[in-house]
Amino acid sequence: MKLVPGSIKGRLLFWLFSFASLLLISLGFFLDNEIGDIVISSVDDLLHSQTQLIVGLLHEEHGGIELELSEIIAGEYSIPRSGHYYKVLINGEPAAISPSLVNSEFNLATGEIVSSNEKSREKIYLSVGPDNEPVRVLQHDLDFMGQQVSIFTAESLRGSHNMINRFRYVLLIMIPLSILTGGLVSLWITSKSLDPLSIFSSKIEMITHKTLNERIDTEAEAGELIGIASSFNKMLERLQSAFDAEKRLIADASHELKTPLSVIKTKCDVLLQKDRTTEEYTEALNAIRNTSGTMKKIVDDMLSLARLDSGILSSGGFQKISIKSVLENAVQLMEVPADRTGVKINPLFRDEKDTDITGDQNTLTEAFLNVIENAVRYNKSGGTADISVSNDRGHVTVMIKDTGTGIRKDDMSRIFDRFYRSEDSRSVEGSGLGLSIAKTVIEAHGGSIRAESDADKGSCFTIVLPC
Ligand code: ADP
């Protein structure tokens, strides 16, 4: 079971309540202790002053000690068992005893000694009085005219104990009441303090996928929420751009698939209008096969991109691979198409030093294949595609240089965009996704890709990967 509640409101309430309760209980103990000390020390003060009064009444008369007690005999000392007592011993023999002790067995010099002072020759006893009441007794010894005098004064603690007990009752009622009131006030304060949070949460709840363009007004939020509100707005921006990119991808994909689909439909419609010769059927079926090949390429590339977007590439699954083996795989897959178009692939890297990189073999092969494929497809018969590797200060650089059509300046900034195809390349089969895939894979490996091109002279793609 959790002692501290999980919610912010519960936590605030718990800590405020615990702190206030602890403070009040400690204060209660402190006051109880203090009041006890104050009352007892006022009793001791009274005993001292009574003792000093009796000392002042000792005087010499006819060579002996005389004690004139008439001044203090009156009042409470004259009422039996009044709770105020005194006794004077001279050389151990009783010389005076308060009338309040008459007919009482109470011996003042008994009980537990609670304090003793050698210097002032004083002792304080805690004893039980003639009325069975707690009594505090002060014994003061002195030498007077060469004789040993002991003065005992005693005060009942019944009144003091009553006062302390009354004070304790007040504390016992006031402390729980204060804790309860403190709890209710804490509840009110926490609810009021957390109001902005509830308003903030209801504003967030209002935002749906249809209203992703809305933002929280940070100016209107409480100080502590401004940071959260602006982080939330930034998250909304990221979500909105991802959502927009997704929508654009679907729109672009539908657009790209619409053309080959209408080509297939038109071919079928034309074929079905009348009986056709075997050659006509063969030609139409070949066209349909090529067009569906284009569609398959688009769908395959879209699936690759979707897989990459879902984060299948993470450094946790990366392994040590040789850059040469990755390039070799890609080159082998392109050898037949390159022969068919009369383009010569020059794998210059075969003569260069191999380097190990950390990554995913399959996706990296796909990325390099896309770039090499472009170097072949956007080339001319008799053209070349040179592939070289160099290693420099923790980085491996792969250059794929072709002698093809080149890329126009206007197109350069967009060739890595999804579905972007330059006007010049429309005659060549493609999905417009190859370079997007390559860029996503390379960047997921912590690398970069860039293109340089001279229209009509060819292009050079430079891929840098950490090693
Ligand atoms: P695809 O090749 O399927 O159209 P890509 O994403 O691979 O899609 O390439 C995007 C565009 O960049 C291509 O349509 C083409 O216009 C241009 N391009 C890419 N590589 C080259 C290259 N080596 N030479 C000329 N143009 C290129």
Image (spheres, rainbow, N blue to C red):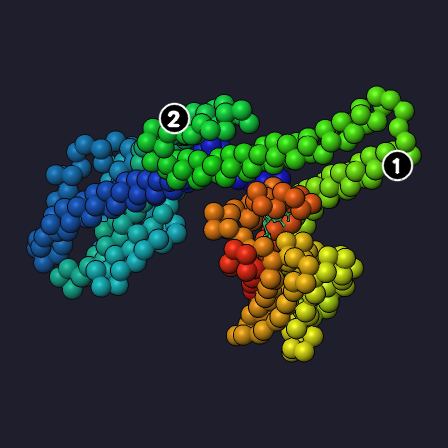
* Nearer-the-camera pick, 388 or 148: 388
Q: How packed is label 2: few (under 14 Cα within 10 Å), some, or many (20 or more)?
A: few
Disc number placed over residue 70 in the picture, else none: none
Q: Quadrant of residue 322?
A: bottom right
Secondary structure under badge 1?
A: helix
Name the amino acid type tagged 2: Lys
Q: Quadrant of residue 252?
A: top right
* Nearer-the-camera pick, 295 or 152: 295
Instruction: Say above or below: 425 vs 271.
Output: below
Q: Position of residue 169 (x, y in %)?
A: 39, 29
Q: Residue at x 76, y 38 (%)?
A: 291
Secondary structure under badge 2?
A: helix
CB-based contact (under 8 Å), mark 1 and mark 2: no
* Residue highlighted by disc 1: 279
Quadrant of the image containing the N terminus: top right
Quadrant of the image containing the C terminus: bottom right
Of badges 1 and 2, nearer the viewer stands 1
Q: Is residue 68 left or right of residue 25?
A: left
Q: Position of residue 398 (x, y in %)?
A: 60, 67
* Residue highlighted by disc 2: 192
Q: Residue at x 26, y 45 (%)?
A: 41
State which tag comes first along the sequence, 1 or 2: 2
**Real-space CA distance between mark 1 and mark 2, rounded to the nearest whole angstrom:** 84 Å
* Nearer-the-camera pick, 194 or 122: 194
Q: Position of residue 448 (x, y in %)?
A: 54, 59
Q: Position of residue 70 (x, y in %)?
A: 13, 39
Name the amino acid type tagged 1: Glu
Q: Is residue 166 left or right of residue 303?
A: left
* Mark 2 Cβ and ligand 1 under 8 Å apart: no
Tell how many labels: 2
